[in-house]
Amino acid sequence: MTTIREVARYAGVSKTTVSHALSGRRPVAEKTKAKIAQVIEELGYHPNSAAQSLATKRTGILGMVYPLPELSGSDRSVVEFIFSAADKMASFGYKFLLLTMAYEETQELLRVVRGGHVDGLILMDVRLEDERVRLLLEEGFPFVMIGRCKRNAGLDYVDIDATSAIYEGTKHLIDLGHKHIVFIGISPWDFGYTHRGLLGYRRALREAGLPYDKTLVKACPSAEGYGRKLMKELLGDGRHFSAVITCGDLIAADVMSMLHEEGVRVPGDISLISFGDSPLCSLTIPPLTALTIHAREMSEIAVDMLVRKLRGERLRQHQVLLRPELIVRETTGPMSHSG
């Protein structure tokens, strides 16, 4: 199997340069990146093949790395991602290990990798520039991402098309007559859904001939209470808007709670859409209009890809991008005359 050393040799660069080009962690000249990409394509290289060919001792355990301090306070789709992955791993005869280490805990991740605690990993909540990806590439350790980095040559991932999702949601609101729409992403700003979702939001505004108002673009953690706080600030600042689209169903539920508390009717006064369609969206009053993220399907695809890599099997697809679906419920409606 092709190794990262062979890619480096054929490209005439160092192994470190190849790792930097793949992870995007360090600057690499565009000409050099183009040469590396060409060699990767010609050799059919995928970063973890070396680890697969050398692995002689298996633990029968697969890990999922979720950088969350408190699972209980996070977005409800998290539960679906976790349980779906565990179920799929069990169907292949693997045990499931959840690793909730923070992004910055790279030494702890390194300890897990070098200690032989798991056979492979699924990375969640991938950032555009993700140190964990660089580390795993350098270690030659088998992994699959649910999400994408800024640069993804040679990487294996499954993701939802967040740009299309937020575009479709924003366009739905515009079609209902809304012109001043709040976008609430998940912080930090280099989180993939937020970055790519904002692109879709701006595209929908641009196509409709509507101005981009950066004061209506916000981000907050996807944990209980933050959406309430942010919406209270927006209402208190007297900003003019008639609709809100959020990256995350928990943020959306928080936003709706604060709107109800302030006597704002949903959707009578303000329409609301969630990017994320966990069971929570059907339980709110009124039920949330939402964009699907296909959490179960993404987890199952990621596990299938990882297991095939460990078996040394050829993957049908190394990069899978799923299309979202807009589920119209009861929190979106025509803009009121007062909006």
Image (tube, rainbow, N blue to C red):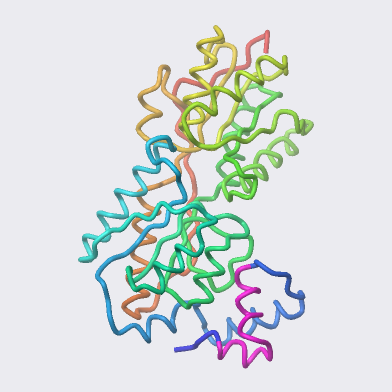
Q: Which of 323 and 275 lies nearest the eye of the viewer?
A: 275
Q: Position of residue 95 (x, y in %)?
A: 24, 62
Q: Taking 81 as reference, is 318 above or below it?
A: below
Q: Residue at x 62, y 88 (%)?
A: 8
* Residue at x-position 73% and y-position 33%: 208
Q: Is residue 16 magenta?
A: yes
The residue lying at 56 percent from left, 91 percent from top is 6
Q: Is residue 246 left or right of residue 315?
A: right
Q: Is residue 108 left or right of residue 138?
A: left
The C terminus: image quadrant: top right
- Specify whether 299 is left or right of 20: left
Q: Quadrant of the N terminus?
A: bottom left
Relative depth, front residue between 202 and 33: 33
Q: Is residue 274 above or below residue 123?
A: above
Find residue 71 and report its horizontal and vertical position in percent. Answer: 39, 41
- Rendered residue at 48%/37% (across/down): 291
Left or right of 277? Residue 252 is right
Count the marks: 0
Q: Establish if 126 lies above or below 256.
A: below
The correct choice, above or below, for 199 with respect to 270 in the image is: below
Dominant secondary structure of the magenta stretch? helix
Viewer-proximal residue among 94 and 181: 94
User: Magenta stretch containing residue 60, yes or no?
Assistant: no
Question: Over which residues does the magenta segment extend?
Answer: 5-23
Could you say where residue 122 lies in the image, as x and y percent from the top left?
41, 61
Q: Position of residue 234 (x, y in %)?
A: 66, 20
